[in-house]
Amino acid sequence: MLRNLTALRQAPLKRFFQTSADAIASSRFQTTVLDNGLTVASEIMPGTKTATVGVWINAGSRADSPKSSGTAHFLEHLAFKGTQKRTQLNLELEVENMGSQINAYTSRENTVYYTKCLKRDISQNVEILSDLLTKSKLEPRAIQSERHVILQESDEVDKMYDEVVFDHLHAVTYKNQDLGRTILGPRELIKIINRDDLVNYISTNYKGDRMAVIGVGSIDHEDLVKQAKQYFGNIKKSTEPFHQSGGDLPVFYGNEVKIQDDGLPQTYVALAVEGVSWSAPDFFTASVANGLVGTWDRSIGVGSNSPSPLAITAATGGPGKTPIVNSYMAYTTSYADTGLMGVYFVAERDTDLSLFTNAVLKEWARLKSGDITEDEVERSKAQLKASLVLALDDSTAIAEDIGRQLVNTGFRLSPGEVFERIEAITRKDVVDWANYRLKDKPIAVSALGNVKSLPSLKDLTKGMSL
């Protein structure tokens, strides 16, 4: 009770400081849209002499065609293999001589190229990024050489069982749809992707209105705008407004894929229902609800005293009150127009998987029934806010947050605005959300390992009606 009273007394003060801090943060964040639709965004971080600058592109593996799946990821690899101005060796030496760090990645919806550099080298780094994106040579010899590298990467991904399980999950929930394709693409297509596929991907997807140049750290916004105009101003704008799914919303299929592999010492399982998009009104409510479900890992050595009933079951639900899984995680994966959410867990090979899957369904039923307390909801909200703040610990993390929001939603919520939305969530909101998202909804499952004891899709679907 004393703790609650203290929180109430401090609430006005917290709101004051949060509002003031947000006002300061807002003054440090600026955006400008160029004539070709490209967004330039910056945020100043006082006291630093470095910056992260990068280009976020609203195009990833989802923009691949079915016949050339893997092109987006292939292109990311080739960007560093030489341009019309720089050989691969010259590029590497130039970056190293500045002391900069350059990187890139491809996701299902985005491609990102970014560098971290000293303030004095920002313009040179922006020019390098432009060179990589707009003047890559895409030489046949480099394509063939990188093809082998990507095939090796595919072999490595096949050994990352969590990646495998989630790739299969996407394939069955979004069957015959762009989100169902893997980021790397199937091996048979990696072997035949050619220069025409790469050039076509660039000309189709690298458009000004689908790109954002982001700078965070010791940055001058007007200088960044000038550099963006100089180096990216020639990129054309889309002829028609872009939609990730081409205008048709993705369809979530309740489905299953179970891969029996007696050689694995552990079993990997992902349960999923249709989740929330990046801009969904209930995006943060979903995160708070997931916080109630929680996470647990036996290596941490706690569980029996956890505030999460599911964590207690995971830690003590086996014979002799032993753990029934090695770990579990409530997850949310969001896209522009849909999402996946559920529980991923890892168990020993001889585990009766029905024990934990039934526990997950029981936990979801608890949320739907409203058998949750105000304290649970407040705890989840506090944990969510803390995790969001801790994730924004340097210029690269902040640039990632800005870039992801701008290209996926078209706007950016400041940390203060995010806090306000989270703080406004009530226990009733969580219960209403659970009944909307979880009650009588299709469920999908992807599993790898000893899957013999995993309940059937029919039984899991029946459990969603509880």
Image (cartoon, grey):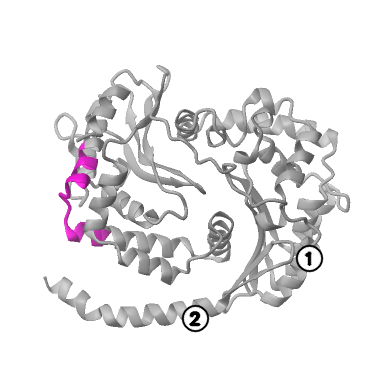
The residue sitting at 48% across, 64% down in the picture is 392
Binning the other alpha carbons within 10 Å of mark 2 as few (below 14), some (14 to 19) or many (20 upward) gives few
The residue sitting at 39% across, 57% down in the picture is 281
Magenta residues: mostly which secondary structure?
A: helix
Q: How many labels does the image show?
A: 2
Residue 365 location in percent, x, y? Answer: 20, 41
Vertical placement of 234 versus 119: above or below?
A: above
Question: In the depicted view, which residue is nearer to us: 309 or 318?
Answer: 309
Between the C-alphas of marks 2 and 1, the distance is 29 Å
Question: In the depicted view, which residue is nearer to us: 435 or 292?
Answer: 435
The residue sitting at 28% across, 57% down in the picture is 380
Binning the other alpha carbons within 10 Å of mark 1 as few (below 14), some (14 to 19) or many (20 upward) gives some
**Is residue 371 a member of the stretch shown in magenta?**
yes
**For the residues carrying marks 2 and 1, which lies nearer the camera in this image?**
2
Residue 225, quarter of picture: bottom right
Residues in magenta?
A: 362-379
Vertical placement of 349 versus 328: above or below?
A: above
Residue 405 in sight:
yes
Q: Name the residue under label 2.
A: 24
Q: Name the residue under label 1.
A: 124
Secondary element at tag 2: helix
Name the outermost residue toward the left: 1
**Is residue 36 a member of the stretch shown in magenta?**
no
Residue 195 location in percent, x, y? Answer: 80, 35
The residue sitting at 54% across, 28% down in the picture is 176
Residue 36, quarter of picture: bottom right
Question: In the depicted view, which residue is nearer to us: 283 or 385?
Answer: 283
Left or right: where does residue 3 sit relative to residue 113? left
Which amino acid, mark 2? Ile
Indicate the quadrant containing the N terminus: top left, top right, bottom left or bottom right.
bottom left
Residue 325 location in percent, x, y? Answer: 28, 34
Which amino acid, mark 1? Gln
